Image (cartoon, rainbow, N blue to C red):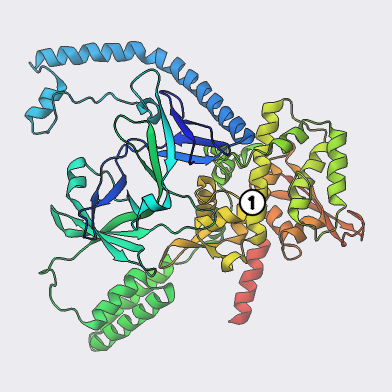
């Protein structure tokens, strides 16, 4: 960025010129003023105050032809939606005009000059020049003039930086007014490295019982880098320097007199178990309370009889039917489905939106592989030959060496599509299909490496690393929330759910086929590192009719191992497996 030019034009995203590598940029909405550049309060103090409000917040990312085409596709889709909304709003224009006329009539009737004046009379602090109709986007706030602005970026030299660093805070609590920003004071806590700020602590002058702590945002090889720029009022030169970013959050301090009466240790332990204990701990505590109550009321048989009756009612309420148990299990594992669907294509119509929301797929430029989109525009014979060449490779071949498809499951989908004579119609359909294959390969990576990657417990950034996405990717965060379960006492770290991820992968792969039928060779099950038979069970669980065919050695390729080829076709909504529950019931009776 040292000698680049940042061009800010009104109504359009920022652009970089004279840059060593292609870069793309977009303006970040900062209506609440959450990005706070900090400065020292004095020359010989560790106190920090807010240095002012940033004029622009720009997100810079690597650019390229693929990213440009993806951004262009997003803008075209947004323009199409805008035209649709414009046509809809035209029909409601007459109704709004009638409402405005009625509103003016009401103001005249009740002798109120304006709604702002009425709000001011009942106690709202509203300035006379307040404007409530501003709905401008961040690009419209770039410059008020027609020509825009151009900033000449210049990185500070080592001798110009000095000994200090540039701290940058992100106010995660909520909206921060200018008055509150002036009263915010932060202190530096030295970290493990000498001269480095480890964290921040501070408070507001008008809120004595509230403390704020700021933890340094950890940096990794794929993390974002924060840069702060400053320029003189009448200059185009923008001096930039890397900043230390801190996320400031709320930490409430208990008042001095808020101690209350003393609480016994047994009562404190009981409350803690009730709030955060496991089911086993809660059951043991409940039994202990019942024994204690029995000891006190052993002479009063009437009271103890009522307790026995209450216990019997509790046990009766815990009885769960097989149907409700199966329905609860399917909701926890399968994507959302319609049990009343008549056509197979309507079963997981909402579930596909839950697996990978289209709005998150659109913003991921890495999903739309242009070489894969060009591959889909070729004739079916060429696709079959290239897929066959990749399938003949040894099974220990890395996924990146399998060609443009990227996984053996993707090769199976391409081969089945070619056998059924399915091909794309135009370039837009090819890009859309390539983006869907990108999601498929992300799900394959999650199912293949998720159980052993960091012990199956990771953050959203770990899922992004698994899928090959950016660490701040919203799609990776969605996968982390969807296929990883919450852990007790861990706010951000979640545990991998293998069955849920595998079912979602199979549903997504089937819907890449118009016929909802797919042929899966034995190498796919070994690529996903699944035990024998688990892939078949997952396909049957989501509602497929599954046929198996024994495959000998070398059938899929010269070095392929023997196995069973699976042919699956989605028949309808998933059904309850009564034989499974009857078998489980017999096992429980034998144990008793």
The residue under label 1 is: 443
Q: Residue at 28% of width from left, 73% of height from top?
A: 271
Q: Quadrant of the C terminus?
A: bottom right
| Identity of the residue furthest to the front in this view | 159
For the residue pair 134 and 448, the one nearer the viewer reads as 134
Query: x, y (%) of residue 3?
Result: 49, 37
In the rendered view, tell whether residue 202 sits above or below residue 30: below
Quarter of the view holding residue 439: top right
Residue 311: x and y, percent?
A: 36, 74
Q: Which one is nearer the viewer's eye here, 144 or 525?
A: 144
Q: Is 252 in front, or is 62?
A: 62
The residue sitting at 35% across, 25% down in the picture is 143
**Residue 337 position in % (x across, y down):** 58, 45
Regarding mark 1 in the picture, which secondary structure is present there?
helix
Q: Quadrant of residue 562?
A: bottom right
Please determine whether, in this image, residue 388 is positioned above or below residue 515. Answer: below
């Amino acid at each position: 960025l040292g000698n680049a030019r940042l061009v800010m034009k009104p109504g359009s995203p920022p652009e970089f010129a004279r840059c060593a590598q292609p870069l793309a940029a977009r303006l970040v909405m900062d209506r609440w003023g959450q990005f706070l550049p900090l400065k020292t309060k004095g020359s010989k103090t560790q106190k920090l105050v807010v240095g002012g409000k940033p004029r622009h917040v720009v997100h810079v990312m690597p650019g390229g032809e693929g990213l440009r085409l993806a951004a262009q596709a997003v803008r075209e889709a947004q323009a199409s939606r805008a035209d649709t909304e414009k046509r809809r709003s035209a029909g409601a224009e007459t109704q709004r005009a009638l409402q405005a006329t009625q509103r003016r009539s009401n103001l005249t009737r009740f002798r109120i000059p304006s709604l702002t004046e009425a709000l001011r009379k009942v106690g709202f602090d509203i300035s006379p020049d307040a404007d409530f109709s501003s709905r401008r986007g961040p690009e419209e706030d770039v410059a008020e003039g027609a020509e825009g602005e151009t900033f000449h970026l210049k990185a500070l030299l080592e001798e110009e930086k000095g000994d200090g660093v540039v701290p940058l805070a992100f106010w995660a609590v909520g909206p921060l007014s200018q008055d509150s920003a002036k009263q915010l004071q932060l202190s530096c806590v030295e970290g493990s490295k000498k001269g480095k700020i480890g964290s921040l602590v501070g408070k507001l002058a008008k809120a004595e019982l509230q403390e704020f702590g700021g933890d340094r945002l950890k940096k990794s090889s794929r993390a974002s880098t924060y840069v702060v720029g400053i320029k003189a009022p009448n200059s185009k030169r923008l001096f930039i320097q890397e900043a230390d970013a801190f996320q400031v959050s709320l930490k409430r301090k208990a008042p001095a007199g808020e101690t209350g009466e003393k609480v016994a240790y047994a009562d404190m332990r009981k409350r803690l178990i009730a709030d955060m204990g496991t089911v086993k701990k809660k059951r043991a505590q409940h039994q202990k309370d019942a024994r204690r109550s029995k000891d006190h009321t052993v002479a009063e048989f009437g009271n103890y009889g009522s307790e026995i009756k209450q216990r019997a009612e509790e046990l009766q309420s815990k009885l769960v039917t097989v149907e409700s148990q199966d329905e609860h299990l399917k909701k926890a594992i399968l994507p959302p489905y319609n049990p009343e669907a008549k056509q197979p294509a309507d079963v997981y119509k909402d579930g596909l939106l839950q697996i990978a929301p289209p709005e998150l797929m659109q913003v991921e430029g890495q999903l739309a592989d242009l070489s894969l989109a060009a591959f889909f525009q070729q004739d079916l014979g060429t696709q079959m030959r290239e897929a066959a060449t990749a399938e003949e490779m040894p099974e220990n071949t890395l996924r990146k060496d399998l060609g443009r498809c990227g996984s053996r499951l993707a090769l199976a989908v391409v081969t089945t599509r070619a056998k059924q004579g399915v091909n794309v119609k135009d370039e837009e359909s090819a890009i859309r299909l390539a983006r869907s294959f990108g999601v498929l390969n992300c799900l394959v990576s999650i199912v293949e490496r998720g159980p052993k990657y960091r012990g199956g417990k990771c953050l959203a950034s770990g899922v992004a690393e698994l899928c090959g996405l950016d660490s701040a990717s919203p799609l990776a965060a969605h996968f982390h929330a969807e296929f990883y379960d919450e852990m007790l006492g861990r706010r951000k770290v979640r545990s991998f759910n293998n069955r849920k991820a595998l079912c979602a992968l199979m549903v997504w792969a089937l819907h890449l086929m118009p016929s909802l039928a797919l042929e899966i060779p034995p190498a796919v099950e070994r690529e996903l590192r699944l035990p024998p038979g688990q892939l078949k069970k997952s396909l049957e669980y989501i509602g497929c009719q599954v046929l198996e065919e024994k495959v000998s050695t070398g059938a899929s390729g010269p070095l392929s191992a023997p196995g069973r080829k699976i042919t699956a076709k989605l028949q309808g909504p998933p059904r309850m497996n009564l034989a499974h529950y009857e078998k489980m019931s017999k096992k429980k009776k034998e144990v008793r």
